[in-house]
Structure formats: structure tokens, C-alpha cells
Image: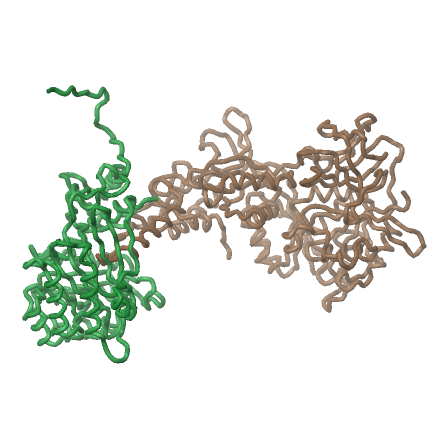
Chain colours: A green, B brown
Amino acid sequence: MTTRRIIPLTPATGAARALPLPERPQLEAPPPLSLYVHFPWCVKKCPYCDFNSHAPREGGIPEQAWLGAVLADLQHALPQVWGRRVHSVFIGGGTPSLMSATTLDGLLTGIRMLLPLDPLAEITLEANPGTVEAGRFRDYRAAGVNRLSLGIQSFDDAMLAKIGRIHGGEEARRAIEAARTHFERVNLDLMYALPGQTLDMALADLETAIGFGVQHLSCYHLTLEPNTPFAHDPPPLPDDDTAADMQEAIEARLAAAGFTHYETSAFARPHEQSRHNLNYWTFGDYLGLGPGAHGKLSSHEGIRREMRHKHPGRYLEGAARSDFIQEAREVSVAELPFEFMMNALRLTEGVPAKLFAARTGVPIEAITDELARARERGLLDTADGKLRPTLQGRRFLNELLQGFLKD
Amino acid sequence: MKHIRNFSIIAHIDHGKSTLADRLIHFCGGLSEREMEEQVLDSMDIERERGITIKAQTAALHYKAKDGQVYNLNLIDTPGHVDFSYEVSRSLAACEGALLVVDASQGVEAQTVANCYTALDLDVEVVPVLNKIDLPAADPENARGEIEDVIGVDASEAILCSAKTGLGVEEVLEAIVARVPPPQGEPDGPLKALIIDSWFDNYVGVVMLVRVVDGELKPKDRILLMSNGLQYPCDQVGVFTPRSVGRDALRAGEVGFVIAGIKEIEAAKVGDTITLANKPASAPLPGFKEIKPQVFAGLYPVESSEYDQLRDSLEKLRLNDSSLQFEPEVSQALGFGFRCGFLGLLHMDIVQERLEREFDMDLITTAPTVVYEVVLNDNSIIRIENPAKLPEPGKYQEIREPIITATIFLPQDYVGPVITLCNQKRGNQIDMRYHGRQVQLIYEMPMNEVVMDFFDRLKSVSRGYASLDYDFKEYRTADLVKLDLMVGGEKVDALSVIVHRASAQYRGRELAAKLRGLIPRQMFDVPVQAAIGAHIIARETIKALRKNVLAKCYGGDITRKKKLLEKQKEGKKRMKQVGNVEIPQEAFLAVLRTDEGK
């Protein structure tokens, strides 16, 4: 049987008309799944930090109650992720390294019992150099943690004091040595543009970090977040140009040292990217457990974001009656392009263009105009079937992303 | 008619005119104690706050004098500012007498002098009154001397009073009866009535305040407005006490209101003569003038969606203010707005403030400009009210600018700085006279320089003691140029100004530097240039921002970062796009607010 094709008289080239947004996302398959577990306590809250972290009340950290609640939380959430394999686990905080190895072991054992955890899964734990005991690192490793992320920030005692950290430069060095002894994969978090910091000081910190031979570095520009002590009473920070000089120098130095700058603030040796974070940036799914943890889960119904009860007391208290969720909502189709881009365009190499439809359930033709505008502004490159920020697009990522916000 | 006295009060702002008027009304029982609001004649909020009377109002009072007779005293209120000198002259033309109220502690001010001269020119009997004599700083002898010296009126019988305490109020009333002549006129002649003021009332349409000179006017008469030939049937006549009270007729010598179903305020022009259609006067009363706006500025809504609301508001204001002119204007930088014409700077301020206060508008106002005459190459003359519309150099032969004669009164301590200021403003000294401690300076000055910021600077260099009055003199050829500002190579039309060539360089540098400081850094270098035609006279560069990235995007929680970006984007909506540069509203506002010398 032959079908007659009608050849349009007007050529199909030229500006393609944008498709209307579908009514709801149409996903063909669920994306990869990760697990995030939040441990909300710190010895002391840092003045720049806007994460959900709390200094423990008198009586110490209720570790056991927390572990029980998190596992109950997971059990309660299982129907949402039924049968899906977990590719990575990230235990963040707060300061999870305040947790005893026994509790951690209980947590990972519980997760393995309840979920199909990939045998090669990346399991990262965040640690604060001020809380390190070498013995504990060994036990963490034995419990199954295979990647350690250390919040070093700086090696300079004066800088560390200014940003309210509980550790000094020497402790930072010792913590890295200990981490390197027990973990094959270590990330160091560094911050630059600290109060009173010069370009040379920032580079000295970086040099020290490189010297430890770690696989991964995250270099963050210190920013003043709303509702933090620094926002209320800002310290004198280096000006924008100095901060930009620091960033460029850091990028150049790390490139020379063999690190790939693969995301806005993340640098890795070959094949050493953070798989867990890559899952966020490629708009994968994640289940968030623990006080204030955020999750994003896709289903045939759509894409849902949820947040656990934020206050630790409230979370622990609600666990007994399976009351974990503080907020949950479906992400509307109109918001999805922005949410996808906000993650994907952080990646230096961007993502394959077809990932957009695969992860959002929205055809990419629905954002034809936005893509064209971003290209015209020199912020986005769509060649070779990719969505990739240009150098200008990476420097002005906010400008690029705003183009995908619905009006 | 011999029991009628029509009078005005001439006074400088703050010298107590309104307070005295209140006292007189109160004394004659025009309003009961309970109805007596303070300063009843200043009915608009803004007037009460600023102490300026905008629209003339009136009160017909019954006063039983010491001679036992009852007199009808018609108080005709006058506006007290330089912008409204024509209205003042019409109010005075309707009177036989005027109280010259001088603050005994401060002496004579420029505005008082100008109005007093107007009164004398119109053969109005001037009765000096020294007010505020209750103040410890009062110096009646000195004030008397100044009145005689500066104005040339005999002040030996000046009445001492305090409107605040009520002292001397009866003496003032007696003096009005004794010294102000009764009106002259032909009660049986053809009607001639002078329009002193007119305003729009939502219920009855235009209300005209008139002084009947000859004849009489009754409801059902068919009236004829002599300047435009329009005819209307008269509905109602009456007087203000200051409440409105209907009458069966207004007769020669009387002051009162006329309502004739007029819908447009433009039809009832101040200074026009009303006569009867079936028995017209042979000639109108002298002195009628069409008044033209002298100062123009663009008014733009901050939110472009409020354009319609701005137009409605302006239309409502014009119902009561025939001197306000406006027409739509498009600025590439500010969007849709209106080019508005005003009598002067105070008038502009008042309109702006009323729009903001009564109509709740957020406005951007461009720099005020005067009307230039431009002689084109074909010898035709065009009038330019908007600097952006000035033809390119080479397309015209010359520009003429309005020149004013400025009279400045000031204490002699400030003569030095004021003369320096006048010279900076391209002033040309015509005269300087000492009257005791006061100095009178007369300058010829380009009006353009006066509308820029002259008032403010005059006040600041004289610590508020100098007073100014000005009159248009003539158009004069001057070496003027249009100074354009360009951002990212694009002309910002709303910021173009016409300046003298000699000050172009300085202004250009100043504006470019200011703008550089106000425009946020962008993704690319942005040149800010000042140019005369194609000739760049100043350049500044806004260095490109190096980055605009959120360092940490904690994968799990995107909501806060999303809000931050939404806020950034929202902020941009309030920016005006010039080429590919985003300029915040505040930058326009700050540049348009000239603050040199502060």
C-alpha cells in the first residue's frame, strides 16, 4: 500500500513555530534514582550557611531517634520508588561526620535491606575537619562509604576564623591525610572571595589542596545568603572584579593540574566526577530522607517535588505516625524547562538535547523560541545535538537561565 | 453701589494672607465657629500644606462699620506665586482696593512688589498692613520704610495687625470701608462682567467667578463670551460667603458666581468679558490675554501599563486647570507618556504632586524645558518644546531662547553669592538698588537657566531669604546646542537637553559620569557618551560584569535559587531597554534630578 505524501509549497526551513506545552509531562521511562539523607546537626552553625543545620540541644544529638525516623521515612516512601535501583547515596548535613560509625552502619544496612542499591553505587559522606577521628573514618569506610567530602573551605587560620569555622588549617591538613588513608575518592570543598582574602591567598589555598592529590575539588564563591548572620551584617568582601580574577586564576591552575572544570563550581580528575551530583544536574530523580531533605520523583502522573519536615524536632516527633512530608507539589509543565536548564546548563559540556524531553516529558520544540533567543545572545550552543552553555553562558548563567523562566 | 467694597490681599507666601482672610470672614460672621476650618480659602490639601493659594476664591462679607452702615465687602483671593501672575492681575482688575500685607519681621519680598506694581498700574488703591506684629522680631518701622522706599506707597498710615491673635482686624475692615473707593459702573448699561476665575464642578459644570462692571446678570439671560463668541443660557448666579448662596441677579459692582451649563473649562477663560447676547457691550474689558505654557516636561508612568490611568488623571486635572496642556509623546527610553505644558515650575510641581497624591500615580518626569524658536534654513520658524525634537545641526540657521527679566530681593549679606549664581546662569545685570538692608537685583536671564535649578540654588545660596519674580521679555538668538546622551551607542532621547555651547562640555561630562555610576554593569562593556550632533564630547565606560552565576546550587533544593532568579528577572522588567542595555528607572530619575551645587 502506498501513502501519498503531500509536499508543502513553503519550505519547512526558517523559524520553526514553537509547539504548545503539553498538558502534563509525558515521560517514557523514569530517570535514574539517587538517595539523599540529611543529618541536620552541626557543632555550631557557620554565619554564611543557609542549609538546614542546627546546633544540638542539651542532651546531645538524638542519633538513635534520627536513624529510626529516617528508616521509617524510607519504608514509608518505598511505594513511590518501587523496584527502582539506587545509583548513589549522599549523606549530607549539617555535619554527618558527627554521627557514630554504628549509626552510619545501621543507616546503610537499612538502606540495602529496603532498596535495591547498586553494588557499585557511589556512597558519599560529608565530613567536617573539626570533627575528625581517624578511627571513625576507617569505620565509615567499613560501613560502606566509598567517597568522602571534606568541608575544608580554607587552610588559612585567619580566614577560617572570619567565616566562623570550628577548625584551623592544621586540622584541615590532618583531616585530609586521614581521609586519603581510608578513602580512595575524596572531595575537598574550598571557598574563595572570603573576607579580606587576596588573589594570592586564594591561590595558596588551592595549591595546598592540589598537593594532597585528591580526585575532586569544589571551589565555591562565598555568597551572602538571605537570613544568615552574614547577610544581616555583611563582612567586607573582595570586590566583584577581584572575585572574578580569583575564579579565573583557580580555573587556570586546576586545568594545568589536570582537573576538568565540569560544572560551575566542580572540578574533577578524569572519571572522578561526583556521580550523585551529576544525577541532579542531569535532572535525575532523588528521594530525600531526613529533616528538611528535598526530593524529586517522576512517575507517569508527572514530576513531584517534596520536602520533609524541616525542623529536626518536628521530623522526629512526626515519624511515629508516618508524618514526614512538610510540602509536596507537582511541578507544572510551564516550570519544567527552567528547572531542567537550571541544572543541566551548570554542566560545562551541557547535556544531549534529547535528554530534555526524556527527563521533563516536554518536547524540546516547546522551547524553540527560548533556545533561539539564548543562542542569539551568545549564551547557548545547540550544535551537535547538545544543549551546551557557551563560555559567556557559563559566566552569565543567571542571564541564560532567566530566559527559561515563564513570565 | 456705594456700600460695596471689592478688595484683594497682596502678600508674599507665609506673610499671613490666608490667616488674615480667615480672620476677616470670621469677624463678619461669614462662617460659624464650627464651620470655621483654618484657612478656609485655601481649599485644596496641597495649598494648605504648602501655604499657596492656587485658585482664586472669594467671600462676600457683611460688615457693620463704625459709621453704623452695613457694607458688602467682597474679598477676592489671589494666587500667590510667580507662575500665576496673569491670574493675579485679573483678580486685581476686579477690585478697587488691595491690602498689601507685609510681614513686619521680614519686610518686602519680590513677589509682593511685582503684584503691588500690577495693582498700582490698574489704579487699585493699596492699603498697607503690617502683619505679625505680635512676633518679637517684628520691626514695623523698618517694614514701613521698605514699603515706601521700594514700592513708593505712603505707609505712614499702615495698619498694624496680627492675623494670628486677631489684633487690628477691625481696623483693617474700617480701612477697607474708608480707603477703598466704591465701585464705579453703569448699572443700566450693557452687561460687562470680568471672569476672575473659572473651575469645573462635577454637578453643575463650569463655575465662573465674575466681577460685574456694568449692567446686571440674571438667570435665564443668554450670555455671550466675548473672546470666543460662544453663547450659553445662564442657569444660576450667586455669591460666596464663602459658602455659595444663590441670588436673583448680580449687579454692577458686585462679585459672584455664574453657572451656565458650560462643559469645557477652556470656554470660560480667565480675563474674558461676559456680556448679554441680545444686548452686547460694544467692547470687552481691557487686559484679556491667552496664556500659554512656558515650561514643558515629559511625564511618564513608571509602570507602562498605567498610561491610560495617567491620561485619565491629566484629563481630570485639566477640567479645573485650563493652563495645563498635554499631548501624547513616545520616548524610546521611557515608553508612552505625555508632553505637558505648564505656566511655570511651581505649576509643574503642583500638577506632579496632585497626580501622585490624588491619583496615586508613579511618575518619571523629564528635565523641564522652555519653548525655543528655531529658524530653519528656509526661514520658517518652528517652536520646540522637546529637546529631542530639535533638528540636527546644519538644518537650521539659529535658535532663539526666551529671555526673562528677573527681579530678586534679598538681604545684602547674600548679594555676592547671588550675583555669582546669576552670572553662572548667563545673567546680565540691569540694575542693583539698595533699600535699607534689602537689595533689589534686576537681571536679564535665559529662562532655560531658570527652569533648570535656579530657584533651588537661589534659595540655597541665600539661605532661603531671596525672593524672585520674573517676566518674559523676548526671544533672543543664542549659541545653543542639543546635548545628547548615548548609552551603548544608542541615543537616550529622554535625556537630551538644550544647553549653551559654553556649558555643553561640562554638562556632558557631568551627565555621562553620573549615568555611568547609575547603570548596573552588564554582560559587556557599555560606553556612555555625551554628544553634540555627531561630535562626542565626553565618554565613560561601564565595565562589563565578569560573571553572574550562583556558585552553589544545592541539587536537592532548587526553590530558593529559583526565587532568586525570578527576583532578578522581575527587577529587569522595571528596567528600560535602550539598545541592548538595561537601564533601571532609578538611573533616569537620578539623572533628571539635577543637583549641582548641592
B181 is higher (above) or lower (below) than B392 = below
Task: Report the front residue among B536 and B328.
Answer: B328
Q: Quadrant of the N terminus of chain B?
A: top right
Question: In this orientation, does residue A116 appear?
Answer: yes
Left-right relation of B355 to A84: right
Name which quarter of the figure residue B554 lies in: bottom left
Farthest residue in the right direction?
B68
Q: Position of residue A30 (x, y in %)?
A: 16, 48
Q: Position of residue B132 (x, y in %)?
A: 75, 62
Farthest residue in the bottom direction?
A59
Task: Report the front residue among B350 and B176.
Answer: B350
Q: Residue at x 64, y 56 (%)?
A: B49
Name which quarter of the figure residue A157 lies in: bottom left
Question: In this orientation, does residue A200 appear?
Answer: no
Q: Position of residue B266 (x, y in %)?
A: 66, 34
B158 is higher (above) or lower (below) than A393 = below
Count of numbered labels shown in the rendering: 0
Name which quarter of the figure residue B199 lies in: top right
Left-right relation of B384 to B120: left
Q: Residue at x 13, y 39 (%)?
A: A384
Left-right relation of B95 to B110: right
Farthest residue in the front direction?
A321
Q: Residue at x 54, y 47 (%)?
A: B452
Left-right relation of A342 to B144: left
Q: Position of residue B282 (x, y in %)?
A: 81, 27
